[in-house]
Amino acid sequence: MIFNKNYIIEKCKEKMPQMDIRQVKIRKKNDMIYEGIKVKPVDGNCGIVIYWKTLEVQCGINATSEEIISKIVGLVDVYLQAVGTDKDKIVDWDWVKSRIYKKVVNYEQNREQLKTVAYRKYLDLAEAYYIKLNMGRHGDAFCKVTLNMMNVWNVTEEELHWQADLNMPKEMYSVKKTCRVLESKGVDVKNKIFSLYVLTNKAKRYGAAAISSVGALKIAMEEIGENCYILPYSVDELFLVPLKHIVDSSVLKGWIKAINRILVSQNLYLSDNVYRLNWEKECVEIC
């Protein structure tokens, strides 16, 4: 399907003058670039990204521009119902607290972006917070938690951290022993003598947040049964290696650095460091 993208965007602006609408390109895993439009209230922080590929699948290859426009308006309506058109829901802490989640990002790489959002420094990372809004069959919408939101809610960073940890079980974290994950990403794992585990959530989105969560790390310990190294593959997932398999952690440092340079796109990059989970102390340390 070939979209007249400029025409569609201009018509959407006419139909939704209260919304800021613009084209975006988002780089995801393996440097794949997804094109779409971002729609958000002119004076709001939350928005929805609708990909052209998604529209093609949902509307069919023979859809007209008018049908595409109608679909976009419908998706935005669903989003606004989830958020609350009058913003009452977003400013209501009692309503929003059950929808607070966290992600971890590289602190130095995101220093500028972190100036306006709620975050907590954690090792060489930053634990940032976002609101997840369920849009039914259309998936989820995400809204970063800003400092202004914290002031409106009258909550502290510590309260945000506690609430995000409380909500983490909803993400359904799990650990799997597998080399297939690496093989699917183009990494040769033949003749590797160590066991590899992958820790992430069901959606495989922002799953590396487990590194700062006692509850998620407990799941890892119950599966592995011993202390382990944590390799930050991306913001979406962590690799775990039992300590007994590796004498020198510098081997893993070289390995994860190479993977980050070859396979991980910049927006998913987390860290070149290797971490150690010490369950006796209930802490994670940089090796």
Image: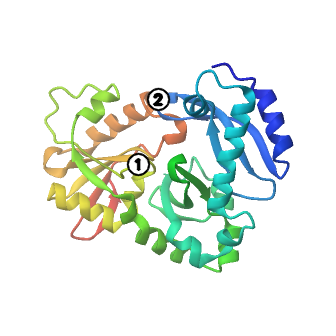
Q: CA distance from mark 2 to mark 1?
A: 18 Å
Please state the horizontal and vertical placement of residue 29, each as a whole percent of the image. 47, 34
Q: Residue at x 70, y 72 (%)?
A: 88
Q: Secondary structure at mark 2?
A: helix
Please state the horizontal and vertical placement of residue 201, each as a whole percent of the image. 36, 52
Please state the horizontal and vertical placement of residue 144, each as a whole percent of the image. 61, 58
Where the N terminus falls, by quadrant? top right
Identify the residue at the far top of this view: 2
**Looking at the image, can residue 69 be seen?**
yes
**Is residue 20 depicted above or below 118 in this figure?**
above
Task: Please state the total of marks drawn on the protein image.
Answer: 2
**Looking at the image, can residue 156 be seen?**
no
Displayed quadrant of residue 251 = top left
Please state the horizontal and vertical placement of residue 35, each as a whole percent of the image. 63, 31
The residue at which mark 1 appears reads as: 203
The residue at which mark 2 appears reads as: 30
Q: Residue at x 40, y 64 (%)?
A: 168
- Mark 2 vs 1, N-terminal side: 2
Q: Amino acid at mark 2?
A: Asn
> In front here: 51 or 12?
12
**Is residue 220 depicted above or below 7 in this figure?**
below
Q: Secondary structure at mark 1?
A: loop
